[in-house]
Image: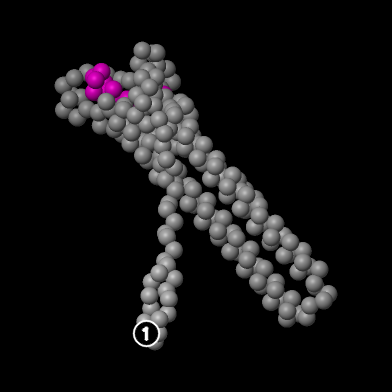
Amino acid sequence: MPKLRFSLALAGAIMAAVILSAPYASAQQVKKDPVSFAVIDVQLILNTSLAMKNVREQLEVQRKRFQVSIAAEEGILRTAGQKLARQRGVLAPQALARRGRQLRNRVALFQRRFQAKRREIDQAFAATLREFEKELKSVVAEIARERGYTVVLDRRQTPYVKPELMITTETLTRLNKRLPVLQLKMPKKPKPKPPSVILGPGLTKQN
């Protein structure tokens, strides 16, 4: 059974695109003032920030919980398949075909549940990452305004950078203070409707 995986490298690419597109200065300001650069290591922030460490821990909990349920369901289906194989010489052809269809339907349902859960976790991670992006972008913009930077680049876009142009440490410090934890945005399951009590013809009551 394939394991759930989440690419922080991909997340870093997304973050880089967001930061590189952030308008820290207007076009008129850039024309009037000389361009002032700063550089930030987005991947390092993704790897070491308190918030993203917290998110990875939550993802691991979700992954382990899901793997346990998957393993249990796989065991049930495996046992059912073995039982059906032993009954080939006992059951009538029609009964054997019917049980075979039932088992295939259970396997197909299992596969759909697996795919749905994987999409659910992927979507939760994407939503959580967007919240992290928003806060990171705000911190970078704040530092850029304070220090007069007109352009902030991702470290991976620059083959060489002077250490004094790096603002990763300051960004990480501020970000950790603002966002020490970040809740994984798992979708809330709808509450089951209370059962109806039949009082008489055409009359029902909600408990």
Q: Amino acid at mark 1?
A: Gly
Q: Residue at x 40, y 69 (%)?
A: 207
Q: Is residue 20 visible?
A: no
Q: Which residue is mark 1?
A: 202
Question: Mark 1, residues whose alpha carbon is within 10 Å: few (<14), some, or many (≥20)?
Answer: few
Task: Say which of 188 and 197 sits in front.
Answer: 197
Residue 176 visible in the snapshot: yes
Q: Position of residue 50 (x, y in %)?
A: 44, 29
Q: Position of residue 92 (x, y in %)?
A: 78, 80
Tell me if 38 is positioned left or right of 190 in this view.
left
Which region of the structure is painted magenta?
Answer: 143-155
Q: Please say if 61 is above or below 91.
A: above
Task: Verify whether residue 131 appears in magenta.
Answer: no
The magenta stretch spans residue 147:
yes
- Going 16% across and 28% down the picture, which residue do you hit? 28
Give the total number of marks visible in the rendering. Answer: 1
Q: Nearer the viewer, residue 74 or 137?
A: 74
Residue pushed farthest right?
89
Q: Secondary structure at mark 1?
A: loop
Q: Locate residue 91: give its quadrant.
A: bottom right
Judging depth in this view, the residue of 9 and 82 nearest the camera is 82
State the residue at coordinates (50%, 40%). Answer: 58
Give the residue displayed 74% in from the left and 61% down from the top: 79
Q: Is residue 81 left or right of residue 163?
A: right
